[in-house]
Image: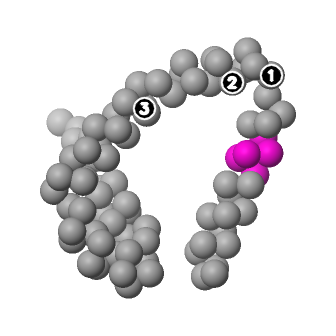
Amino acid sequence: MTDYQKEQLDTLKIVLRHLSSLSGAKIARLKEQVADYLAFRKSVDVFLQKHFSDLCTRTCFESELSACCSKVVSLLFLPISS
């Protein structure tokens, strides 16, 4: 496991530990608060699968740099201020 993967795993454990401490009402409220964001992420996922899947598989995942496409694609969706 790479240092990056260890960091990601440690972060996930922290988040899961925190979520497990929340009451049912707080979990329900959190789900309400992130619903729009999750819908946006789903639309981004569909777009990525359609347009970048092959490229990301070759250049990121096969090279074991699994986050590289995520970081690049994040830049594509930054809001443009006028």
Of marks 1 and 3, which one's residue comes earlier in the chain? 1
Mark 1, secondary structure of its residue: loop
Number of numbered labels in the structure image: 3
Distance from label 2 to label 1 (Cα)?
6 Å
> What segment carries the magenta color?
14-18
Q: Quadrant of residue 58?
A: bottom left
* Residues at circles 2 and 1 in contact by the CB criterion of under 8 Å: yes
Say whether residue 39 is left or right of residue 29: left
Residue drawn where x is 67% and y is 54% of the image? 12
Q: Is residue 5 above or below residue 35?
A: below
* Mark 3: amino acid: Tyr
Residue drawn where x is 61% and y is 82% of the image? 2
* Mark 1: amino acid: Ser
- Looking at the rendered structure, which numbered label has been put on residue 27? 2
Residue drawn where x is 24% and y is 62% of the image? 53
Q: Is residue 5 above or below residue 28?
A: below
Say whether residue 47 is left or right of residue 26: left
- Looking at the rendered structure, which numbered label has been put on residue 37? 3
Of marks 2 and 3, which one's residue comes earlier in the chain? 2
Q: Which residue is mark 1?
A: 23
Is label 2 or label 3 in front?
A: 2
Distance from label 1 to label 3 (Cα)?
22 Å
Mark 3, secondary structure of its residue: helix
Q: Where is residue 69? Give x, y as percent.
A: 33, 66
Q: Is residue 48 above or below residue 57?
A: above
Distance from label 2 to label 3 (Cα)?
16 Å
* Mark 2: amino acid: Ile
Q: How is the image coloured?
A: one colour
